[in-house]
Amino acid sequence: MHNFEEIKDMMIYVADDDEINLRLIKAVLNQAGFSNLKLYFSGKAMMEELTHNRPDLLLLDIMMPGFSGYEVLEWIKEDPQLSDTPIIMITAASLEDNMEPLARSFELGAMDFISKPFSNLELVQRVKSALRMEKQRQDLELAARQIRSLEKLLPICSYCKKIRADKNYWQEVEGYISEHTDTMFSHSICPTCYEVHVKPQLESLKHDHDPD
């Protein structure tokens, strides 16, 4: 579990056409220690920003003029560069009367849902949970990239040119490559080795057979 210090500076975008709601969310999250927030009065404005910068979390109001929260959510999830972005949908609709906003939000790929009016504690805890999950995903993605990078490095002895395989076992390059790839070897002699190794042997044999 990541502690708060590791997530407090992660970037949060908030889109809501109601200025009062935007200011309330900003105030609550600022008071909780989150300072890296950007506010947007429309889905369109947020979408324009997303083409340049990917945040760590989106808080997205459903009912907005122009592009609704649903449309923004769907657009994000269809973009390979943005699709991993966690999104919390916010709506003033009462879930007691209609569960459709919640169901549709999850179907389109939202990770969480908040219904207005929400308590300050609920907002903060849901944001913390979402950011911890995103930080974990980012850490795992970084680890995977590092592993892929390390897989491209082969420790090779400076003297005998053997390769270090698993468990500090050293083996010939030919054997290692054969075990780890579909490569088949055909043996030949390079010009340098011919001059250094083969040619002297041939000349030696020739001298041995020359009559005195």
Image (tube, helix red, strand yellow):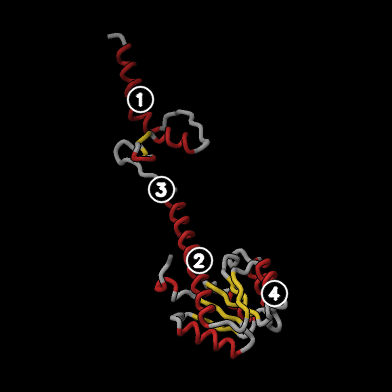
Label 3 SS: loop
Give the residue drawn at x 57%, y 65%. Answer: 84
| Labels 1 and 2: the sequence-earlier one | 2
Kindly identify which residue carries mark 4: 101
Q: Answer with left or right where residue 204 lies relative to residue 103.
A: left
Kindly identify which residue carries mark 3: 153
CB atoms of marks 4 and 1 within 8 Å: no
Give the residue drawn at x 68%, y 83%. Answer: 64
Q: Answer with left or right where residue 112 lies relative to residue 164.
A: right
User: Could you give the CA–CA distance between mark 3 and mark 1, rounded to whole angstroms?
Assistant: 35 Å
For disc 4, the neighbor class at 10 Å (few under 14, some 14 to 19, many from 20) is many
Task: Estimate the x, y position of residue 135 in percent, counting from the top left.
Answer: 47, 66
Kindly identify which residue carries mark 2: 133
Q: Nearer the viewer, mark 3 or mark 1?
A: 3
Q: Nearer the viewer, mark 3 or mark 2?
A: 2
| Labels 4 and 3: the sequence-earlier one | 4
Label 4 SS: helix
